[in-house]
Amino acid sequence: MTTGPLNVSLGTHEPLLVSLSDIAAFARVKRPVVSTWRRRHPDFPAAVSEDSGRPLFDGAEVAEWLIESGLGNAAAAELRSEVALFGIMALRERFTPWQLVETLGSLLCLRRLDGRPLTDAAIEPQGGTEADDALWSALLRRAERIDVEDDFVLRELRALDATAAPLARLAEDLVEAAYDERGAYEWLLAARSRLGLDSLAADAVAPELRRLISQLTDLRLRLEQGESLTVADPHARAGDLLAALLDDTEDREHITILAADPDARLARITRRRLLLAGVGELDLDVQTGPDLEERLADPDLVITQLPYRPGENRSVIAALAEVEQVADLLRPGCTAVVLGPADALVDELKDTGASQLRSALLRGNVIESVIALPGGVLPFRPGYRPALWTLTRGPVPEAEGKVLLADISSEQLTAGVRTRLAEDVLLWRAEGFRELGGHDPAYGRAVPVAALERTFGGPLTPPAPPAAAIWSDKVKERPALIAEAEARLERATADIRTYENERGPYRGGVLRRVGLLPRRTTLGKLIAERRVTRLPGHRIDDRHLTGKADGHHAILGPEEIVGERPVGVRRIDRLVLASEYDRVALTEPGDVVYTLTPRLGLYVDHDGFSVVAFPARILRVELEAARPLTPRVLAALLGAARGTARSPGAVRPARRIEDYQLPDLDPAEVVTFDALLAETEHRERLLRAQADALAEARSLTMAGLADGTLTLADPTALPATVHSPFTDRNRK
């Protein structure tokens, strides 16, 4: 890849103009950051024009400045591709989104087939429409010579005239940013929604699901064993699954691709995509039509996504019939992965005909595994519930007459979940699961087909958790963990009883005030009188944060202060703090940390030595003042101040914290109030310890009874030494 300056333009003399918001988008920062760069860096590119008062900049100059300065959160290659994509989107007034995707794809294919750049260095410097005419005429001649049968590029280029010449320059910029034509085309297709082609993005699946499907094919291992494979997709659409499968290997010389789609446009996009991915022309057969004809070879692998149909128009029988057609493509030793609707592949079937068809597939010993997937793995259709079937012709003897059922519908499809699930299926395919010394599946449960037949039309979900989950160390330790929780509950109950015996019942000693009310003040006045000092928070890079076991100083940010995250979970190492944040001051014991975002939150840091993360800030009570407050009292009065809430649609709080009004209590009253607050906090800690122990014992017991690994003894047979606060109360 070349590293020279970008030359992105919409025409020979038209630079790509971008706004400050556009710069923020492709630099992956917030909009105010760009304004800060412009103010602080004298070498920031100057605006070249204005649009309704908004400054516009040369996109190529800005991208080069970002690359040289190292600012922003995008790599150099991403910046170059983003600038080129902005240039493509700027042409949407001249060309339709379909024309942009089809023409650019054709130009990239022409570049790959011809083996040389699209633009001519001898023509480009001349400029003007004459250069555009000469460039486009030269491209058409090359296309007519190379693509005589119009398999990849010819019709798309013939449909446009020389006004499309800027697209050739933008295609070159994409190739420069992406190293090669394939990377450029994949970047373009990844931006299909931004270009306005929602119909082309509607069937796209989440990246982790694409990787799961690729893993389930085991393509890489088969190629490493020296096999030449034929991969088929009878419902290719834009070729997303096939392209993801080819990402898994560099050995594309031993792969033959068969694909089909009824939409001629999508078939040509898939054909171009696979050619650019490295599949040879003679090993590629993408057909236009509803049925896949096996003209080149018999498939060894089939991956496909059944066409989406709305729920009210979806036919379970039609979906199962399409799966049956996929099964018919398989010969012994071949594998298929089918993504389809869960109501046909997993759910209970009410229709007798559909039940009979699914039962026939089960009895045919061709269904290897059934996987219920989580929602949201098709981002364009978050309400659609998908499922996966893997099919194999001639399974290993240990898997004969059985189906592996897995349900991850309540899980998030992360890399870890994907890897463990793929391991379950691949080991099931290779050797089945032996009773002793075999693989314990993390998600799958092997179920005999005969058992599924007894519940004719019943759901294809695991009848119980996987054996690995039932016999895991965590499950085996549940009785001991429950006993520990019960012991903590006993100790917490005893602590409460002892404390109440020593201090007596809780009494606040509150009385109705007689006489004048205390005078009102504001936090701003307390700060001006130096009774309270306000200190700033600090901007901490998330990359420097560690877990509870590694860090020395707790991070107090808005999440901790408002209770959305436990205090102490986020920490920072003291050496990192000293080297990266030389001006950060730690909190002192008793500092009040507050935030107004997303709502008012107050936290008294009794231990100190924490780092306050912006936008949180610190209020430090000056105990040597004439009328001192205490941290507890200040936090309590600010939390009870009137008018501190924010309306649901408001972007900013109703008023500044300096304007919060609070009573200026007498020093003696402050001391009494602080003692009452300390008493309340202590009792809350005792009760929380009791509640936490009880909640842990309950959740462990419920989990054990739910998965069948625990049972309950007769309450009358429990030891007499086991007490409960409820039985003690009843006994009294």
Image (spheres, grey):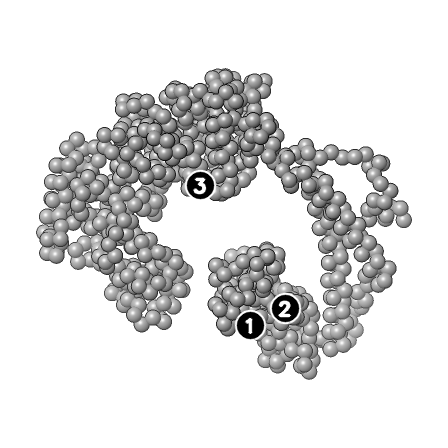
Looking at the picture, how far across and down is residue 580, in whole percent? 48, 67
Query: Disc number at residue 608?
Result: 2
Dividing the picture into quadrants, the one containing residue 244 is: top left
Query: Disc number at residue 208?
Result: 3
For the point 52% across and 22% down, the residue is 398
Looking at the picture, how far across and down is residue 124, in whole percent? 13, 54
Query: Disc number at residue 585?
Result: 1
Q: Earlier in the sequence, mark 2 or mark 3?
A: 3
Looking at the picture, how far across and down is residue 479, in whole percent? 72, 40
On the rendered structure, is 101 left or right of 210? Answer: left
Can residue 273 be seen here? The reply is no
On the rendered structure, is 348 left or right of 377? Answer: right
Determine the secondary structure under disc 3: helix
Q: Amino acid at mark 3?
A: Glu
Q: Amino acid at mark 1?
A: Ala
Q: CA distance from mark 2 to mark 1?
A: 11 Å
